[in-house]
Amino acid sequence: MGGVIITQTAEEYPEHIDKLVYLTAFLLDDGEKLLEYAETDDNSVVTANLVVDEKEGYATVAKDAIEDAFYADCSAADVTLSRSLLRPEPLAGLVSPVDTTEENFGSVPRIYIECLRDQAITLKTQRTMRENLPCEDIRTLDTSHSAFLSAPKALVDHLGDIA
């Protein structure tokens, strides 16, 4: 959900942001909703295993799908630690539309780092989002969703180049 957060932050404070870096993240246009967009990704392990609790107002991913969805190429220690830190996601962030303008969000340069083996947001979906909202630069990592765990040096190299 980090992509939605940085998008909305850029809408509110564009003068404070030099660049937005989307790391295999949702890059949504004005009016789009994360959950509706995610549901178009037929091959996403997350979408196929999303557990929504409307009464409690949150969503989770089925426990037996978490590793494949987010940490497929991570060490066992990283998977164990990450699982212990996961919490249910409030539904509001999943169903609220992104609210952006060309003057604010549109004025901030965007860079996208795609992850080729991501099963949370598949490569096809990452590329479709970028077609709809082009980025000034595109980088690639041959990782699953959590490149910050599985390939931290390669990620840092990209971020250093971008900075």
Image (cartoon, grey):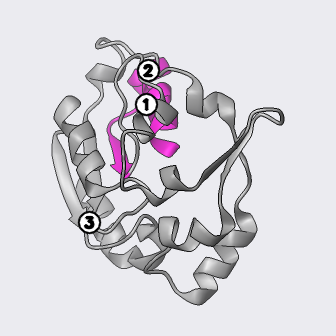
Mark 2 crowd level (few <14, some 14–19, many ≥20, 10 Å Cα): many
Instruction: Name the residue at the bottom extreme.
Output: 76
* Res 116 label: 3
Q: Would residue 116 appear left or right of 20 to someone viewing this image?
A: left
Mark 3 crowd level (few <14, some 14–19, many ≥20, 10 Å Cα): some
In three-dimensional space, the C-alpha distance between marks 3 and 2, rounded to whole angstroms, equals: 28 Å
Instruction: Residue 148: name its quadrant.
Output: bottom left
Q: How many marks?
A: 3
- Earlier residue among tags 3 and 2: 2
Q: Would residue 147 appear left or right of 127 to someone viewing this image?
A: right
Q: Which residues are magenta?
A: 1-24
In three-dimensional space, the C-alpha distance between marks 1 and 3, rounded to whole angstroms, equals: 22 Å
**Residue 4 colored magenta?**
yes
Amino acid type at circle 3 is Leu
Q: Residue at x 17, y 36 (%)?
A: 131
Q: Are marks 1 and 2 in contact (CB under 8 Å)?
A: yes
Q: In the rendering, at what x and y percent does residue 3 appear?
A: 44, 41
State the residue in front, 34 or 42.
42
* Res 153 label: none
In three-dimensional space, the C-alpha distance between marks 1 and 2, rounded to whole angstroms, equals: 6 Å
Instruction: Residue 52: name its quadrant.
Output: top right
- Earlier residue among tags 1 and 3: 1
Instruction: Name the residue at the right extreme.
Output: 56
Amino acid type at circle 2 is Glu
At numbered mark 2, what does the secondary structure look like: helix, strand or loop? Answer: helix
Q: Where 137 sits versus 71, above or below?
A: above
Residue of label 1: 7
State the residue in front, 161 or 35.
35
Instruction: Residue 92: name its quadrant.
Output: top right
Q: Residue at x 55, y 73 (%)?
A: 67
Q: Residue at x 53, y 43 (%)?
A: 1
* Res 11 label: 2
